[in-house]
Amino acid sequence: MSLTRRERLLYSSSSLGGEALSRARSTWLVFYYAPPADADLEELLPLGLVGVLLFVANLVEALDDPIIGYWSDRTRSRLGRRLPFIMGAAPLWALFAVLLFTPPPNAGVAVTAAYLFLVFELHHLFGTMASGPYESLMPEIARSNEERLSIVGMRVYFGAAGALVGLVGGGLLVDFASFQVMAAAMALIGLAARYIGAAGVWGPAKRSRATAEISLRKSLRLTFDNRYFLLFLPTFVLFSAGLQMMLGVLPFYASAILETDSEGTWVAVLTATAIAVQLATVPVYQRYARRHTKRRAYRVAMLIAVVTFPLLALGGVLPGAPVEAQTIFLLALAGLPLAGIFLFPAALTADIVDYDARVTGMRREASYFGSQNFVEKTATSFAPLLVALILLLGNTADDPLGVRLVGPVAGVLVLMGLWIFRGYDLEDDVSTSTPAPAALDSAGEPGPQE
């Protein structure tokens, strides 16, 4: 049964709350615990310690994704496989988002550090339980290529709106209220959006009952034996890492290339420029994918990134134009491929899941999304470290070599992903285009081809 436009819209709207909460948390968490010396705030922890804690915590929490995905795929309930996780975990996800900004007062460095690490882990644990199964609904409830392209397009728009709520609204609440008010407001928005999204597809979600009866070891082996998953996953990770590097260098770019003291304002201007271009190109990518294929549209996005990301090195070099105008223009060019990374990965993963179902006879959406998230989180957590190492080559107005090199290195990463993806030839609408082998036998091995 096809989803109505209303169901697709409500399901996609959850991205607004998720982005609002995550962007506000990411922007202010380090600042809250380790504010600059000239800020009128108490330093709760040394900056270096906060960085190490969050880096380790991110690596540890990435392990949650494949385990929770496997658990969700095997769950039996009258609400289906996904809704119990979404409805039960979302309130705790929101609660621990608030608790991140309410450490015990006057507790000392050791207790505060332990508190931050534990609450951060619990926030992400319940976030994975609420978001992983929610994301895994898409391949089940949206079975056609057209429905999937429609949903991922809506999610891009809702996600951009959520980013604005988190970045702009969160900043205003910090300035005019408090960190705690900001955290509570964003948590409520995230929780409400998740529940509204789940309610919008409640009927189709309840029908998600085809449990995957297989061991965790065999599930992981089958997932990482999937040829198409192995071609897509490193491509997605390298594209994501390149984007993270581009975002991470912007404050240094504003300082070293634009030579301004208003880094925050310029980062906002540059990111807004890239986001505006990204949103404007969403219909273009969707139209191209419908006329050709999603894989071809994704390749086009990567190719554009390979060309435009390195151009960031040229800011202020070209004669005859103000450096500010050059930089805005270059960020607009860098925004051209961004819709591709936000549109196609989930839809391509849905196709890969459909192919796996044809091979194994089981629906294992959450196992694939969980494994994908684990690899992405683990790999992209090193992107800030790579940026830091490159910036050691020069990050000042007098010596900006490192700042200029980040864009070219990001472009090389995407080029590597494009090279790997060249062997991906899975068609859209796999359920109607791929011959169906037999289901797994009792030992968990793929049966013979029909």
Image (cartoon, rainbow, N blue to C red):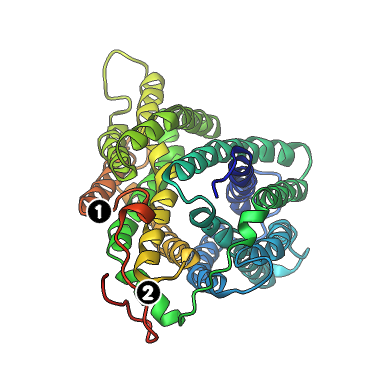
How many residues crowd mark 1 within 10 Å: few (<14), some (14–19), many (20+)? some
Residue position marked by numbered label 1 in the rendering: 424
| Above or below: residue 141 compared with residue 149 | below
Between marks 1 and 2 in the image, the one whose residue lies nearer the viewer = 2
Place of residue 428 in the rendered image (x, y in percent of width and height, measured from the top left): 34, 48
Q: Quadrant of residue 164?
A: top right
**Disc 1 and disc 2: Cα gap in Å?**
23 Å
Q: Give whichever of 447, 302 is nearer the camera.
A: 447
Q: Looking at the picture, which amino acid does disc 1 mark? A: Tyr
Per the rendering, the mark at residue 308 is: none
137 relative position to 382: left or right: right
Q: Nearer the viewer, residue 83 or 58?
A: 83
In depth, the one of 71 and 120 nearer the eye is: 71
Q: Tell me the residue that label 2 is attached to.
A: 439
Q: Tell me: residue 156, above or below residue 424.
A: above
The answer, for residue 208, to whether it is visible in the render is yes
Q: Amino acid at mark 2?
A: Ala
Q: In the rendered structure, which disc, 1 or 2, sits on the residue that comes first in sequence?
A: 1
Local secondary structure at mark 1 = loop
Q: Which residue corresponds to the image point at 64% horizontal and 48% vertical from the top-left? A: 21
Q: Is residue 333 above or below residue 415?
A: above
Q: Mark 2 falls on what kind of element?
A: loop
Q: Residue at x 32, y 33 (%)?
A: 291
Quarter of the picture holding the C terminus: bottom left
Residue pictured at 26% horizontal, 39% vertical:
303
Image quadrant in which you'd find residue 47: bottom right
Residue toward you, 279 or 165: 279
Question: Farthest top residue?
Answer: 320
